[in-house]
Structure formats: C-alpha cells, structure tokens
Amino acid sequence: MTVTSPEFVADLAADAEAAGISGFVAAAVIRHDGRVLFVRRNPDDYMGGRWEIPSGTVEDGESILEALYRETAEETGLTIGEVVDYLGHFDYSNSRGTLTRQFNFSVTVEKAEPVILTEHDAHEWALPTEPPAVTDSLGRIIGAIPQAQTDH
C-alpha cells in the first residue's frame, strides 16, 4: 500500500481517532537540493518564534493528503510535485489544550522558489543534519529522513 493510497491515509486517521485524538495536522518535509525547508512562526502566534515545517489543520471533509497539498500552497506558495514517503507522526497539545496529531510526509515541489510566506516571518533551506531550533519531536522526524531522499 502506497502512502498516497486512500486506504493508507484512512488508516492513519482511524489510528489517531482510536487513540482519542481528534485534531489532525498535515505537515510537509519539503526537500530540494539536499535541503529541507523550515519556516518560523510569527512572534505573536502560539509558539511564536519556533521553527517548524509547513503544516496546517485538516479541515472537516478533507483528507490528510488534501490538507497537505492545500496547506503547503497556502503557507509557502509552493506546489507539491510528489509525496515521496510518510515519515511518521507526533502528538502535541495545541493552543486550546487538546491533543493534535501531526502527520509528516516527505515531499518534493515543482519549483523551490520563490517561497512566499503568508503565516510565517522567515524561511530557511537547511541540511536535515543541521536544522534550525525545532522541537525534539520534529527533530526526530527530520533526522529519520533517509539520505537518498534528500539528494533531489
């Protein structure tokens, strides 16, 4: 079963719901020329100043993959070319104090520039081995990317 199959994505959602998690976020580990795109939250946002990857809430009636494509375009102006792999998930408390599960996918984009930020104040293309200051959970996801997947 491929990571883009409806069955695989439905299983991800079902597993999260079985764990009592109702908030879903789709996140893109965007790879280009051996680097990963990181974006920094605006200082006045929840967790302001934190570096992360493009991500956003899965809306009602939307699949995790649909949210992945939409949020990547909304937050960066970039268009996903290919979803390469599912890199795993982590759970965190959101601004409302409930648990959210972030589903992380390795993706390529059609063009890496220009990055047009709408919800962040900075971006950086960094080596996966040298990310900016990210959470431990995201650091583990980035660190788990096979080297072959960063050489595009």
Image: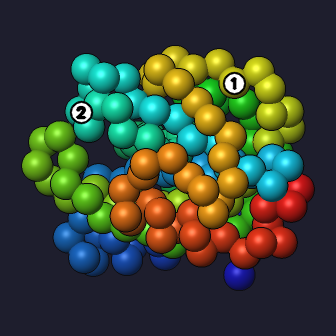
Identify the image quadrant of residue 93: bottom left
Nearest to the observer: residue 148 or residue 58: 148
Relative horizontal placement of residue 136, taking residue 53 as reference (left or right) = left
**At which x and y percent is residue 71?**
55, 35
Q: Is residue 52 visible?
A: yes
Identify the image quadrant of residue 7: bottom right
How many C-alpha atoms fall within 10 Å of the one at disc 2: few (<14), some, or many (≥20)? Answer: few
Tell me the residue at 37%/77% (across/down). Answer: 15
**At which x and y percent is residue 133?**
43, 48
Tell me the residue at 79%/42% (across/down). Answer: 109
How many C-alpha atoms fall within 10 Å of the one at disc 1: few (<14), some, or many (≥20)? Answer: some
**At which x and y percent is residue 37?**
64, 42
Relative horizontal placement of residue 124, taking residue 63 as reference (left or right) = right
Nearest to the observer: residue 59 or residue 143: 143
Relative horizontal placement of residue 60, taking residue 22 as reference (left or right) = right
Tell me the residue at 37%/64% (across/down). Answer: 136
**At which x and y percent is residue 110?**
86, 38
- The disc labelled 1 sits on which kind of residue? Val
For residue 46, above or below residue 82: above
Q: Earlier in the sequence, mark 1 or mark 2?
A: 2
Residue 115 - label: 1
